[in-house]
Image: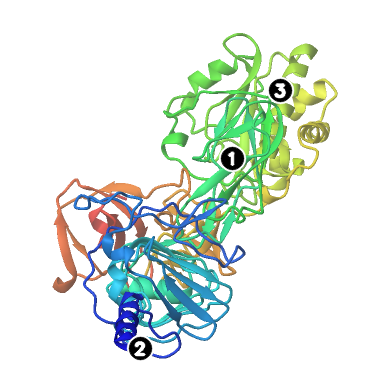
Amino acid sequence: MKKLTAIIICLALLLSVPTVYATGEETTVPEVTATEAQPAEPTTESVSASESSESTLTTSPSTTAEPTAPTSPTDTTDATEPSAEARRIEFEGNIGEGLEFVLDKETAVLHISGDGRIMKSFSQGEAPWYPYASIIRGVVFKTKNLTHISRYAFENVEMETLTLPDTVIAVGQGAFRNAKVDELIIPNKKVAVFDSADTLPEKGLIRCYKSADIHAYAEKYKRNVYYYITKITHPDKSEILMLGEKYTPALSITPVEAEHNIKWHTTDSKIASITQKGVVTAKKAGICYVYASSKDNPKIESKERVKIIVTEYKFTQSIQTLNNCYKYHTAISPKGIVVHSMSVNNTNAQDYATRWNTPKPEGREVAVHGFLGKGEDGTIQFIQTLPFTMACWGVGSGSKGSYNFDPGYIQFELCEDNRTSQTYFTQVYNQATDLCAYLCLKYNFSTKTIVGHYEANALGYGSPHGDPQVWFRKFGYSMKKFRETVKKKIHAIDPDPDLTTGTKNPKHLALKDAKLYKKAVADDYGDSVKVLKTIKQGEKLSFICDIDNGWSKVKYDRKTGYVRNDVFEREYLSVFYKKKLLKKTNLYTQPTAKKKFKAKSLSKGTKVKIVSVITKGKKKGWTLITRNKKDYYIKTKYHKK
């Protein structure tokens, strides 16, 4: 009787012990029907490769917290309590050499830990936690060396966020088969992904660094990917601002597909503040620096900081929008300054700013960037009348070209009196040297590039004029002394100025595939002009000058040639000429009247944009036009010359 009682007690004890599955051998887990629970909403921060390899579902800047069960519309369980199904789950095991797992019964969180590198490989439905996948609330990694996520490891899991360890460099086939993960975070910068549709979650967001493998995978399987920034650069080295002036630094990030999750910084907000949209406001005279960093990884910040120079110098604007020079605008990259003087007794700068705001001032095609003399209040000031990056019609041409266009110079007029007042001359001289110091710092060119009109003529880039030499000599001054004064003022503002980068041609990205021609003629089908190079979309070309007809001279891959101005973006680029059709005209996709190339017809009087007129070669007599962002050919004789 005593033996029978002992046997019954032993059986009772065995039945009361929770089931534990094998830790080293492959075992079969009994099928369980689990009530699905909605995942918790975690607060996450990305983990960089330089941070701890411990990866958790829910993190904060200073602590690691395990997720809690949320409530849902159909769940009446308290948010801090796991469901009845979750309370009875507790088992552990081995999933590879040096790797263990525990499924916590209180939180329904899967813990993976150990020093091992590679998980045991599973087939579909073989992961030991697979029967409970739908109610696992999160995954916590406490590993040091884990490099591989095995096949079908997280099949069928459902959660809001899963962060892989920063040591993981490979994700196996089917790792997230049928998984529903709102946000998968992959911190390692070089991760290989098995080429299978079920390797990464089909829906949700994947946060990661751009690797060739992940990018190809995302493109092929249409995954929603958020790429982290790996590099930040600022093309602008410095910017000079007047008090109250605003400026937005240019920004370039790598990879180009990365999210612009940027934080802006200033080294002295009393001199210049900056908003988180990157807008700088000049507050007080002085020098400070602004730069950007990645919000995802603050350690990634721009190495080049933009120097902000705030000056108390100021001028006014009265842009002459009615002047033909403004209406038929041409872009320049300023390479220097031409100083003119009007040579007539009129000190009123505002008068010139007003009277020259007409198509042809005094019956001439003439315009400059501004006038320096007396303003409306009688004080000596500079009034800007054209944008500084727009070509003016000021200096004329010489034996080598013109400082109006190639290279483009900023040009302004000094308003003379009757050349008798030393006081007035000194006031104008001081204002002019202040202006030139400002322009040299803004466009980063040397004082050596400042010339008078008479010097421009001597150099071969201007018409025969003697200004401002005659007025300067009257009071014992010269352009040489003028340049020396400007140099001193520059160094008083900025002890370490950049006066060289402005001499370089600015770079622009090609907006589309294009051709670099030997001449400004797009003859793709004739032989009147040679194609020097083919430019691919996104490649860089260096802007030399705009040649005033919708074309620009550029340098690309060590070749200098011409491209259409719709190939790249720059302020004030000239546009294609518009001409009226003399009669109803057919448009063709190639320069031939064959019926199969006919695209449409346009009525008499329609204005068309002329890209180029082919005057030589096999296709002589055809004109290339552009209309609604498409190119067509028409007979040259059907539009006005």
The structure's colour scheme is rainbow
The amino acid marked with disc number 1 is: Gly
Q: Residue furthest bottom?
A: 25
Mark 1 burial class by Cα count in 10 Å: few <14, some 14-19, many 20+: many
The amino acid marked with disc number 2 is: Thr
State which mark lies toward you, 2 or 1: 2
Residue 449 visible within the image: yes
Mark sitting on residue 27: 2
What percent of the width, then of the height, locates residue 618? 33, 74
The answer to whether 108 is drawn above or below residue 425 in the figure is below
What percent of the width, then of the height, locates residue 187? 51, 66
State which mark lies toward you, 3 or 2: 2
What percent of the width, then of the height, locates residue 133? 31, 71
Report the residue at 19% width, 70% height from top: 597
Structural distance between the alpha carbons of marks 3 and 2: 89 Å
Mark 1 highlights which residue? 396
Mark sitting on residue 431: 3
Q: Of callouts 2 and 1, which one flags the residue occurring earlier in the amino acid sequence?
A: 2
State which mark lies toward you, 3 or 1: 3
Q: Secondary structure at mark 3?
A: helix
Report the residue at 71% width, 36% height from top: 454
Structural distance between the alpha carbons of marks 3 and 1: 25 Å
Near-viewer residue (130 or 507): 130
| Left or right: where 388 falls relative to 526 | right
Q: Of callouts 3 and 2, which one flags the residue occurring earlier in the amino acid sequence?
A: 2
Mark 3 burial class by Cα count in 10 Å: few <14, some 14-19, many 20+: many
What percent of the width, then of the height, locates residue 63? 55, 53
For the residues bearing labels 3 and 1, Cβ distance under 8 angstroms: no
The amino acid marked with disc number 3 is: Gln
| Left or right: where 145 falls relative to 119 | right
